[in-house]
Image (tube, coloured by chain):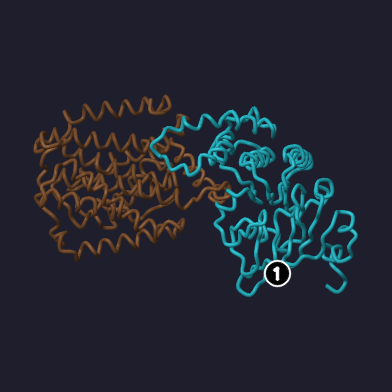
Chain colours: A cyan, B brown
Amino acid sequence: MSDSILETVDLTREFGGFVAVDGVALTVRAGTIHALIGPNGAGKTTCFNLLTAFLPPTRGTIRFKGRNITGMRPAHVARLGLVRSFQISAVFPHLTALENVRLALQRARGASFDFWRSEKVLQVYEDRARELLFDVGLTGEADTVVTQLPYGQKRALEIATTLALDPEVMLLDEPTAGMGHGDVERIVELIRRVRGGRTILMVEHNLSVVEGLCDIITVLTRGRVLAEGDYASVSRNPDVIAAYLGTPHA
Amino acid sequence: MFGFSKAQQFAFLTMLALIVICPFVLYPVFLMRVLCMAIFACAFNLMIGYVGLLSFGHAAFFGMGSYIAAWTMKFWHVDAAVAIVLGGATGAVLGLCLGYLAIRRSGIYFAMITLALAQMVYFFCVEAPFTGGEDGIQQVPRGQLFGIVPLNNDMAMYWLVAAVFLGSFLLIHRIIHSPFGQVLKAIRENEPRATSLGYRTDDYKLIAFVLSTTLAGVAGGTKALVFGIATLTDVHYSTSGEVVLTTLLGGLGTVFGPVMGAVLVTTMENYLAQFGQWVTVTQGAIFVICVLAFRRGVIGELGGALRLAL
């Protein structure tokens, strides 16, 4: 377990009487791409919200790099290097692509409460922002207002913004959701190319993406871990097949 | 210049020219009323237009700024500049207290909490002895600026108000175009994403709120000086409503919109005053037309038609 970077013990979240996440023990090893899959309502996104402190857990602990991060503020968790994306495209729509990435880079200045300074001080981040846009294939769109970008490019921009923080662990919530086939392949290729050895935990519905990209898969159903392993073993697991396809008794 | 775009530079120079020319043509006291309202609306616009939070209690900061400036002027005989600064400081302190309680909410909840807190301030002002209750603080002397310039002359007072307005206007412009302003826009656009990039969004929103309430206090203090009076009307919720109307009519989230709104609303009040209660009815009708026909406000629609950001 020495190489685990993110670990949860008995992670539980209840909403009223409903247990969305129920005693999940998850271990993400450093340098792997780890997928979290499961049918709708299995608690995948709730899990993400708990890991990134957007929701406080009812019970259980979360350790990141050996440090207990349970109960921290979400902005603090992000600063430690555990950065998430969102299911719906998480961009700043009325800013330009360059400004989007620059906002992530700008955070390195610390708390930027300096309302008396000109935004010219942010020009130092522009070269790096352009590099990141180049990495995700958006060189020509730097000054485009993001609402005008097609969906696939928005997701690529989101990845560039996340990478700008140079996080140790990236949590991607359905990076290919709502995409056409061509875009899916492009994003998968992009994730593989730009991750640079970073650990990734992702929620993904598209099983062919999971098969091609992920080292380890954890299957959740009704808030519990049903199975864990590589794609080959998980996809043959009869419980998993039952959860996805239903059983005659269900 | 100041990070304005070409079109904004043109608009700014036009505004500057009007500020210089108008007092020779129009009644300066009316113009001062417009400028005080413009400072107030610009301050309000900082919250609604650039943070996306509707404060329905801005009269509390405007009114308390007005009371404190009037009181210190009348009883301590402070310098006019000091009185305006004290008005701003009052807005800041009160903004910090009320903002701390309200800032964690958004949307309609934020509007309701700010309204409720502002009503508490209103009832405090009704009861507290220093405000003079229904009488208000009257016959406030204008005093002197920096101990040398007497302000009894309307023109002298006008240049001071114009300077305060320009200072506030440029300060807001700088805030919007600062690194801090970038983060504010990010929060307005997508708050969870800003959080996930490691920004403590509540802190940013609170600082923006305090900046806004400070300028609202400055506007109130300046107003008290101009008219020599601070009354319950200044803290009443109808004043909060008026600043919302002014900003909406001019154009939310535009740089010049609140100024245009202040010109329109104040002119309307001035020329419709003879019709008494009908002012409110007319304002209501205009508000309805604005929401139905030109949602982006006068400046917003104009900018949209010309494809320019004003």
Amino acid type, callout 1: Asp
Q: Using the image as rendered, state which of residue B303 and residue B9 is in the foreground.
A: B9
In the drawing, does residue B56 fall left or right of residue A36? Answer: left
Q: Residue at x 68, y 50 (%)?
A: A171
Q: Using the image as rendered, state which of residue B231 and residue A194 is in the foreground.
A: A194
Q: Secondary structure at mark 1?
A: strand
> In the rendered picture of this protein, how many numbered marks are placed on residues?
1
Q: Position of residue B36 (x, y in %)?
A: 24, 42
Q: Position of residue B98 (x, y in %)?
A: 35, 58
User: Relative to residue A124, is residue B63 depicted above or below?
Assistant: below
Q: Residue at x 10, y 47 (%)?
A: B77
Quadrant location of the C terminus of chain A? bottom right
User: Relative to residue A126, is residue B47 depicted above or below?
Assistant: below
Question: Which residue in the structure is indicated by mark 1?
Answer: A22
In the drawing, does residue A66 fall left or right of residue A210? Answer: left
Q: Position of residue B269 (x, y in %)?
A: 23, 46
User: Relative to residue B16, is residue B105 depicted above or below?
Assistant: below
Q: Residue at x 65, y 33 (%)?
A: A132
In the drawing, does residue A233 fall left or right of residue B233? Answer: right
Q: Using the image as rendered, state which of residue B302 and residue A148 is in the foreground.
A: A148
Q: Position of residue A246 (x, y in %)?
A: 84, 67
Quadrant location of the N terminus of chain A? bottom right
Question: For residue A137, what is the image quadrant?
Answer: top right
In the drawing, does residue A119 fall left or right of residue A239? Answer: left
Label 1 Cα crowd, 10 Å radius (few <14 / some 14-19 / many 20+): many
